[in-house]
Image: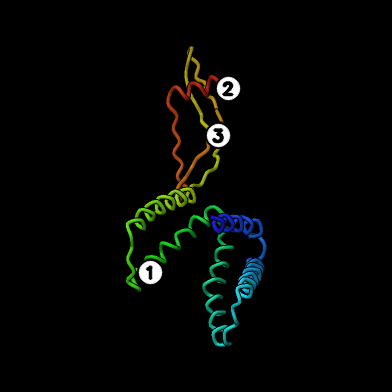
Amino acid sequence: MAATICWGLENNCTKNISSKSTYEVVVLKGIFSGTGALIIAFIKGEKLPGFALIAAAMLLGFIAYGLSIFLYVRAQNVLGAARTSAYYAVAPFIGVFFSFMFLHERISLLYFAALIIMIAGAVVVIADTLIRKHEHQHCHIFIHTHDGTTHKHKVIHSHFHNHYFTEQKHKHFHSKSEQELMLNQR
């Protein structure tokens, strides 16, 4: 639980600095994370391995941690902390699937239950990402005749629209009662 709380706190702190240079953020996170892990290893009495093992661990760390954090920070800058975390949370499911495919490990029913919940959450996040909300100003011209005189009225009003995928489709209709209400509000 403490690790989860710290991870959430760290992700939100990263969001606050994600508009800075992604390279600088990743280097600083790597230095502090690596130094912290090294201090814990020395406190536990671990010994330094040989140079070949250190080089291999650094290469693996660069790919598995460095590139991952780089893409994560860049995503936070573009998508925001909440969306990025939601997408990032899919990673364990992919890892379990790969362990099933390549290591022939067993997958439990709990995995599928959690996967269904994760997919539902991802759909909500994706749908929210695709919505484009903006305001449109509309002009309606009403022509009507009463007492033998034809009148022309111009009514301008605004509507908020939510669009999925495109902002080009605009359908806008008013019922007869809405039209009369707009004319009376003039």
Identify the residue shown where x is 64% and y is 69%: 36
Residue type (three-letter) at the residue carrying disc 1: Phe
Identify the residue shown where x is 48% and y is 42%: 162
> Please, what secondary structure does the residue beneath circle 3 have?
strand
Residue type (three-letter) at the residue carrying disc 2: Arg
Gap in angstroms between the C-alphas marked 3 and 1: 51 Å
Q: Earlier in the sequence, mark 2 or mark 3?
A: 3
Disc 3 target residue = 158
Q: Earlier in the sequence, mark 3 or mark 1?
A: 1
Q: Quadrant of residue 135?
A: top right
Disc 1 target residue = 98
Q: Looking at the picture, tell me which residue is in the foreground, 149 or 84.
A: 84
Vertical side of 120 occupied by 139: above or below: above
Q: Position of residue 23 (x, y in %)?
A: 64, 69
Residue type (three-letter) at the residue carrying disc 3: Ser
Vertical side of 60 occupied by 122: above or below: above
Residue closest to the far front: 45
Q: Looking at the picture, tell me which residue is in the foreground, 33 or 171.
A: 33
> Please, what secondary structure does the residue beneath circle 2 have?
loop
Disc 2 target residue = 186
Gap in angstroms between the C-alphas marked 2 and 3: 14 Å
Vertical side of 50 occupied by 128: above or below: above
Q: Position of residue 48 (x, y in %)?
A: 60, 82
